[in-house]
């Protein structure tokens, strides 16, 4: 029997039980599960193991190796790309043959393809969320030195992130990595995105039975505008006088508000009037997610974390113990035990398969709206029950 060569990253199954001697579209039963996907050319299947589901995609050996290596390097640079679990080669096939290689990635939990966000001929009330999502994804990949070369609706996975949409790059076949990406490559990547999205929107309109005049062909151009604004904001150097150091702090706070953590700050003389030039190096968009993990070890996406941190601050203000340095830790543990855990557990019981952390932020948003209506804070337990009773409404897109 033909035995493939398997290169597996630690923490994943060995995948040896899969019938590699057959092409994946002839695989049957057992571990295979049906999952929704975007539009794609290569065969792809999903296999369920105890701890996770994996996506397995067949391509030629060279491309498989390139995609695996790219995803592996990207994993160390950004959280916005699919996590590679293994590279498979079938040495009995010619390397240039489709199927001579396969890339295994971990299925992105709670993610879904763009189809689920469509309303009518476009993205309806979610258009604005999509602009932010795509602009933010490209900014983060470019900060990580990644030229994508094929940013499209189908090469991205989507996840609800409180009132926003989080996007994750899944297809890295065409990507190339640099220490830092040139302006020319960024421009080129944006042009590819604009073209791919126009094509995608034309397909969506056609599938909705609408003509091209109803298609949102400009969506990519609007994403580029939003991208440029964000890129500028992140990369704009600050030139200040020695007495204006407060401006550095203001800039860092602004970047943190946007969700970006600041990795390093360079201060160099600007040559004129004693002024200095400040360059801020930003990491990924995970400022609040990192903070929440440090405080509570809860895993959440950036906007979910932002909402949960406000809930924690509210809880501290009401029930906080400020009598000892350990008081803060005790308050956080109480909040987890009495609020976060029981509420998310209830959400999981009522809606299996739905991300309970997203559910919790849906509840927080509901509680906020009830408080605005009432003109004063509302009690959490009663409001949680009311939210369940109302059918667990989520964030309404504008
Ligand atoms: N790790 C993953 N988690 C969840 N879904 C995934 C994952 N990897 C791939 N998919 C789904 O499978 C689809 C196809 O994957 P991918 O884009 O890598 O295939 P492809 O054939 O190389 O695409 P293309 O035609 O753009 O070259 C994606 O649209 C996505 O919906
Ligand atoms: Mg693809």
Image (tube, grey):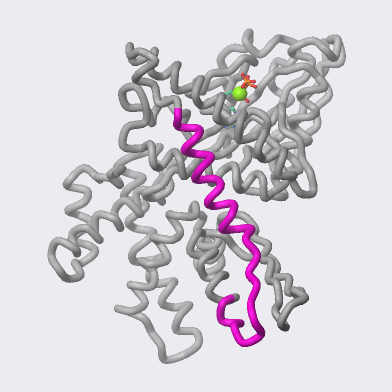
Q: Nearer the viewer, residue 363 or 200?
A: 200
- Picture mark count: 0
Q: Which residue is at 74% across, 77% downward?
A: 272
Q: Is residue 173 visible?
A: yes
Q: Is residue 227 left or right of residue 308?
A: right
Residue 220 sits above or below residue 95 on the image: below
Instruction: Spot the residue most to the bottom.
Output: 323
Q: Is residue 48 visible?
A: no
Q: Nearer the viewer, residue 288 or 244?
A: 244
Residue 171 sits above or below residue 333 on the image: above
Q: Which residues are magenta?
A: 218-247
Instruction: Spot the residue most to the front.
Output: 272
Q: Is residue 229 left or right of residue 90?
A: left
Q: Nearer the viewer, residue 91 or 49?
A: 91
Residue 63's image quarter?
A: top right
- Quarter of the image where ligand 1 sits: top right
Dominant SS of magenta comes to helix
Say which quadrant the N terminus sits in.
top right
- Residue 397 falls inside the magenta stretch: no
Q: Nearer the viewer, residue 263 or 15?
A: 263
* Residue 381: image location, x then y, percent: 22, 62
Q: Which residue is at 45% across, 40% downward?
A: 131
* Residue 15: image location, x then y, percent: 71, 27
- Residue 241 falls inside the magenta stretch: yes
* Residue 58: image location, x then y, percent: 70, 18
Q: Which residue is at 65% across, 32% downward?
A: 105
Instruction: Spot the residue most to the left.
Output: 374
Residue 270 sits above or below residue 389 on the image: below
């Amino acid at each position: 029997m033909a035995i493939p060569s398997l290169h597996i990253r630690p923490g994943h199954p060995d995948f040896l039980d899969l019938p590699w001697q057959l092409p994946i579209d002839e695989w049957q039963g057992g571990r295979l599960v049906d999952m929704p996907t975007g539009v794609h050319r290569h065969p792809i299947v999903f296999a369920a193991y105890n701890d996770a589901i994996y996506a397995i995609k067949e391509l030629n050996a060279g491309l498989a190796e390139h995609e695996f290596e790219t995803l592996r390097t990207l994993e160390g640079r950004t959280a916005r790309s699919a996590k590679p679990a293994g590279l498979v080669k079938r040495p009995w096939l010619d390397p240039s043959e489709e199927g001579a290689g396969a890339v295994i990635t971990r299925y992105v939990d709670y993610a879904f393809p763009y189809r689920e966000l469509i309303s009518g001929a476009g993205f309806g009330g979610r258009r604005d969320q999509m602009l932010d999502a795509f602009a933010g994804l490209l900014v983060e990949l470019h900060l990580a030195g990644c030229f994508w070369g094929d940013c499209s609706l189908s090469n991205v996975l989507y996840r609800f992130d409180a009132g926003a949409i989080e996007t994750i790059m899944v297809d890295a076949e065409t990507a190339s990595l640099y220490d830092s990406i040139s302006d020319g490559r960024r421009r080129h990547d944006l042009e590819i995105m604009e073209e791919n999205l126009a094509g995608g929107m034309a397909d969506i309109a056609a599938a909705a039975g609408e003509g091209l005049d109803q298609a949102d062909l400009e969506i990519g151009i609007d994403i580029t505008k939003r991208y440029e604004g964000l890129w500028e904001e992140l990369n704009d150097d600050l030139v200040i006088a020695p007495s204006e150091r407060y401006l550095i702090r203001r800039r860092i706070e602004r970047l943190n508000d946007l969700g970006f953590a600041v990795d390093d700050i360079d201060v160099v003389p600007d040559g004129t009037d004693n002024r200095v030039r400040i360059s801020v190096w930003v990491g990924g968009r995970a400022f609040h997610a990192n903070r929440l993990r440090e405080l509570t070890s809860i895993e959440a996406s950036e906007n979910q974390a932002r909402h949960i941190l406000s809930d924690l601050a509210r809880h501290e203000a009401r029930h906080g113990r400020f009598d000892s340095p350990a008081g803060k830790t005790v308050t956080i543990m109480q909040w987890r035990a009495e609020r976060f855990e029981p509420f998310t557990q209830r959400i999981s019981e009522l809606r299996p398969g739905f991300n309970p952390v997203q559910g919790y932020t849906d509840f927080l948003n509901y509680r906020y709206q009830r408080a605005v209506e009432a003109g004063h804070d509302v009690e959490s337990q009663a409001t949680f029950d009311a939210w369940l009773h109302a059918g667990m409404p989520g964030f309404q897109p504008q």
